[in-house]
Every structure is written in structure tokens, then in C-alpha cells.
Amino acid sequence: MLQRTKLIPAPSPGVAAALPSAANDSERLDRQTHAAIGRLTSSLSPTAGLLAFTDWACHLAVSPGKQFDLLRLGFENAQRLSNYARDRAFAAPDLQERHSIVKPTDDPRFAHDDWQYWPFNLTHQAFLLTQQWWGAATHGVRGVSKHHEDLVSFAARQLLDVVSPGNYLFSSPVVLRRTLEQGGANLMRGAMHALDDVERLISGAPPSSAATSGSRPARSC
């Protein structure tokens, strides 16, 4: 027996008139939520980052050959660093005898001669070897899209830069030397700059460099 199809009644004129308003409210809420997330993430999409990381991690998890290469590279770098520390411990004070394992020509962070003295030579070489390993880990994983590979590689470099020995007072010989030469005045200037940045962030004001249209000189420790 055929069953009669029930027709859905059309909304009343009052309900139909309210639908566009509800849609506008929903869109406004979505925009406000996305804007708040954008402020927290510096306009970077957390969804895009999660997709890129998942793509890289899942393909790396099913690539035993790549995992073996990374394991071997890790052991090789550890051995190189150990040999470097041993050789430099008994090296002459001549800077030519304190050559580096890895010294990228396009990386000026460790170009100062002070980085060639212990223990700063060991810490910056360990950092560069770690950076080299992560560069190998985030590139050449079969199946990962080029865009996701670039995102993961960029994120890895940014996170590594956070722990770079050149960013901290007691691990940077250049900052230590300048602090001694200036009697700590550079640290006071840095604290004032940091306070200014926090105040501008809280008040929503633009960065000081933007406020002066780039006329303000670059900050230096």
C-alpha cells in the first residue's frame, strides 16, 4: 500500500522574516569568534597548522626508512658533538684551532669570535646540529604535501629559535660582553622596551615602530 507523503508546512510570514536576522546574528558571532582567535594566534590559522602537523606526523609514522635515517643522523650528530667537545678541550687558544662543526654562511647569529670560546662554542654547535636534525626531519617525508612541509618546517625553525643560546643573557657571550661594557644599561633599555610593548599590547596601540612610520631606530641590547 502506498503511503501518503506528508508535506512540511511553509513557515509563517513572521518566522520567515526572522530567519535572515538569525543568520546575521550567527555570522556576526562567527566573525567575532574568528577575530578573537586571530588576535590570540597572530592571525595564524590553528586549523591549518594542525592539518599540516597531522599530515607530516602520520606520513612519518609509516615511513620506517625515514625514521632510520633520522635515528642514524641523531647518533652521528651526537658523536660529532662529543668529538668536537673533546678536541676543543685540548685545543690551543688560537681561534683557528677552535673551528666549528657547522657554521652556516647565511646565519649571522654566531658569527662573533666570542662564540668560539668554551662553553659557548659547545652550546651553539649543539644548537646548530639540533637545527640540522629538525631540518632533515621536516623535509623529504614521502606523501607530505609541499605546503604542509613548508608549514611544519617553518614552525620547527620558529620553536628552535625560541631556545637559541643567542637569545638569553647567560648563554650569549655577545650579550654578556655588552652588559659588562655598559654596566647593565642595555638590560635597562631592554626592560623599558618590553614594558612599552606590553602596554601597547594591552591598550591595542600599534607597535612603536609602526607608530613612527619606521623612523625609530632598531632596538639593540
Image (tube, rainbow, N blue to C red):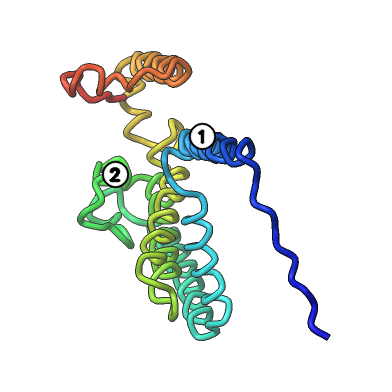
- Crowd band around label 1 with a 10 angstrom C-alpha radius: few (<14), some (14–19), many (20+): few
Residue drawn where x is 37% and y is 17% of the image: 205
Q: Position of residue 195 (x, y in %)?
A: 44, 15
27 over 130 or under it: above or below? above
Between disc 1 and disc 2, the foreground one is: 1
Q: Name the kind of residue labelled 2 in the image.
A: Arg
Picture quarter containing residue 188?
Answer: top left
Marks 1 and 2, how far apart at CA: 46 Å
Image point (33%, 21%), residue name: 206
Residue at point 39%, 37% (across, down): 172
SS at circle 1: helix
The reply to whether residue 189 is in sight is yes
Residue 219 at x, y percent in the picture: 27, 24
Question: Which residue is label 2 attached to?
Answer: 109
Q: Nearer the viewer, residue 100 or 156?
A: 156
What amino acid type is highlighted by mark number 1? Arg
Residue 105 picture quarter:
bottom left
The quadrant of the rendering that contains the N terminus is: bottom right
Position of residue 20 relative to residue 131, above or below, is above
Classify mark 2: residues with Cα within 10 Å, few (<14), some (14-19) or many (20+).
some
**In the depicted view, which residue is nearer to us: 177 or 18?**
18
Q: Which mark is residue 139?
A: none
Q: Are marks 1 and 2 in contact (CB under 8 Å)?
A: no
Q: How many marks?
A: 2
The residue sitting at 44% across, 50% down in the picture is: 160
Q: Position of residue 47 (x, y in %)?
A: 51, 54
* Earlier sequence position, callout 1 versus callout 2: 1
Helix or strand or loop: what does disc 2 sit on? helix
Badge number at residue 28: 1
Q: Eyeballing the image, is 17 above or below 84?
A: above
| Image-quadrant location for residue 99 | bottom left
